[in-house]
Image: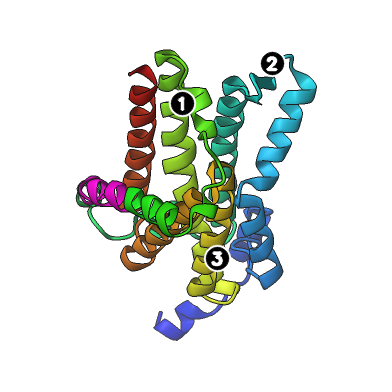
Amino acid sequence: MDDTQAALPAHGPTAAAAATHASPLAGIFPLPLPRWFAAMQTLLVCGIPTQLVVMMVLVLGSNMPIVVDGDLSLELVAIVSLVDTALIALLIRLFLAIHGETSKEIFIGRRPVWGEIWRGLALLPVVFVSVTGVVLLLRAVAPWLHTVDRNPLEAYMRSPMEAVVFMIVVVLAGGVREELQRAFILHRFEQRLGGVRVGLTVFTLVFGALHFNQGLDVAVAVGLLGLLWGVLYIKRRSVVMSMVNHASFDLAQVIQGALARML
């Protein structure tokens, strides 16, 4: 049988049997990705809707303390953050699957993982010093941006045990979840929502604004840090380096705060 014959659709009993045993989902996936669907996915994955839902369920359906000494309780923050991390990961996995994409393709790319891990760790001292320098510079030239005298995150480092719990939260909900969100949203912007530069600008502004409770100076520094992590993903097409750098930076911040509080 020549190639032309092989390419023709089958007929007769064999074709009928194949049609009878075909999956009811055959021909449905992968789904097309119109602009409205891409926008809906980025909104759901950004974390705000999912965190609000998780917090509402916990507040209405449990007796856990909501506020302790004027701050949201560590128990509430930890559970909301970790459950939301799992929800975001599941949503991303679902949205990639229904469009015929894979997590490895979007988040890992072709770069060796161990090399990206070492690069992320090696960049930590540079990032740590740079962020500290930006905050100090802003407080010197624009002191009105220093709107918070006490970092609210210090409330979660009252004891070594609380500090350990908070370390787990910042690594998983900060380093892992936020970099998965950033990469996925940049990917969708590149596909359907105006381009990766637009996505990087939007996500950077939102990322910085979500840290305003730590002070406007800190929000600016964190926004610039998010810009760096976004550029790293765009350039390397791998989330590993930025994820490791983000997680290690957050971890170093908590360790620094816990040591300062104890001393």
Packing grade of label 3 (10 A; few <14, some 14-19, many >=20) is many
Q: Position of residue 7 (x, y in %)?
A: 49, 79
Residue at image point 60% right, 47% down: 91
| Residue 17 visible in rendering | no
Cα separation, mark 3 vs mark 1, equals 31 Å
Q: Quadrant of residue 202?
A: bottom right
Task: Read off the magenta span.
Answer: 119-130
State the CA–CA distance, disc 2 to disc 1: 17 Å
Q: Residues within 10 Å of mark 1 (few under 14, many from 20)?
A: many
Q: Does 120 sit left or right of 64 as displayed?
A: left
Amino acid type shown at disc 1: Phe
The circle drawn on residue 166 is 1
* Residue found 32% across the figure and 44% down from its top: 244
Residue drawn at x 30%, y 53% as measured from the top left: 130
Q: Secondary structure at mark 1?
A: helix
Amino acid carrying label 3: it is: Arg
Image vertical order of residue 164 relative to residue 53, above or below: above
- Residue identified by numbered label 3: 188
Between discs 2 and 1, the one toward the N terminus: 2
